[in-house]
Image (tube, helix red, strand yellow):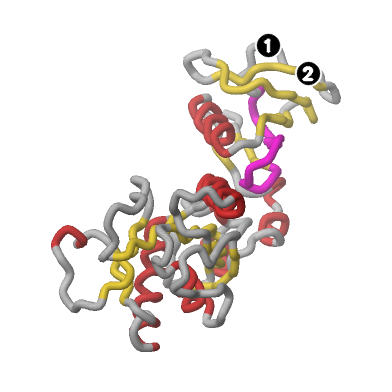
Amino acid sequence: MTKKTYTWLVPNDPAAIALCLLRGSAPPLDRAVPEPGLARFAHVHDLQGAVVDEVVVTALAEDAWEIACHGGPGMRAAMDTALSQHGFQETHSIDNDPWQDWSSIVHPAAVRIMAREGMDQVYPWWHLAHRPIRILLTGPVNAGKSTLLNTWCGQQRAVASAQPGTTRDLVRTRVQYAGWIYEITDSAGLRASTDAIEQAGQQLITQARSTADVVLYCWPDDAQGLPQPEPNDQVLITKWDNKSLPSHHAQEFVWHAPGFGSAQRSEELLERLQKRICTLLNLPCDV
């Protein structure tokens, strides 16, 4: 029996168009595939016959087809599901050439794992291999987001001040942990405002949320009546100086403040935080 495979030809980033290569069997379409060298519009359907997306399918050979579909993350996930239902298995490289994939991988840890275990394995973190891991810092004003960013990258990357509204724009920096590259984004504090610049900053937060792999919500423990974190946010309790932790915070991550304590304490907390991110994203941190 011929193996049915598909391979995404473009990185897993939001885009207008995404390209996918199918081999071994014709795509699940609502019309016949074109002759080799020709292309046509068609609809990809799932196992129940429901339309997944309107695509352009090009026949590259008798057993190879290229599909151009919409490139949003939701559509790519829907295509993954539909192709899997029809018996296609995703492969990570084209023509079994590992150098094509390795040349675009950004994480040293991913390269080490693949060199050791092989290109034909299914890795739960593969969708993150070709870009940095996106981490968004958000939360109310004066919650310690910029101080956390500066501590994380080991330098004054963002201006930290007790003055509310110091951060207006998105501030990004990159760090590496256990061979994984994190792109950390500091954002404006969440609050209602009539200031046009602050309102623009709030809109940027919404956009950054839509592409973040992990959202860290900095929550001052003494805060009252402030915007609440969203269900999938990872809550960091900031500005907490007591040694004991109340029971209602037992499942949340506590970040010591002000000043995040001693340098040793900050290092310990960063280690815990970064390990937690690895766990959330199924990233091995001991390679």
Q: Which residues are magenta?
A: 9-26
Q: Which residue is mark 1?
A: 31
Determine crowd level at label 1: few under 14, some 14-19, many 20+ residues with C-alpha closer than 10 A: few
Q: Is residue 82 magenta?
A: no
Q: Which three-letter amino acid code belongs to the residue tagged 2?
A: Arg
- Please tell me whether the stretch drawn in magenta is mainly helix, strand or loop: loop
Q: Which mark is residue 40?
A: 2
The kind of residue tagged 1 is Arg
Q: Are marks 2 and 1 in contact (CB under 8 Å)?
A: yes
Q: Residue at x 26, y 65 (%)?
A: 222
Looking at the rendered image, the quarter that the N terminus falls into is: top right
Q: Along the polypeptide, which appears first: circle 2 or circle 1? A: 1
Question: Secondary structure beneath disc 2?
Answer: strand
Can you give x and y, in whole percent of width and height, for residue 108 in the image? 59, 69
User: Residue placed at 82% from the left, 23% from the top?
Assistant: 36
Q: CA distance from mark 2 to mark 1?
A: 10 Å
Q: Quadrant of residue 27?
A: top right
Q: Which image quadrant for residue 99? A: bottom right
Front residue (pair 162, 108):
162
Q: What x and y, as percent, mark residue 13? A: 63, 46
Q: Is 177 in front, or is 243?
A: 243
Question: Looking at the image, which residue is at 51% across and 76% down?
Answer: 150
How many numbered marks does the figure carry? 2
Q: Is residue 25 magenta?
A: yes
Task: Examine the image and state in which quarter residue 128 appears.
Answer: bottom right
- Tell me if 30 is positioned left or right of 287 in this view: right
Q: Position of residue 119 (x, y in %)?
A: 59, 55
Q: Is residue 4 visible?
A: yes
| Residue 133 vertical placement versus 84 (above, below) | below
Classed neighbour count for the residue bearing mark 2: other residues with Cα under 10 Å, few (<14), some (14–19), many (≥20):
some
Q: Describe residue 119's horizontal placement relative to residue 10 as left or right.
A: left
Relative image position of residue 15 (x, y in whole percent): 68, 40
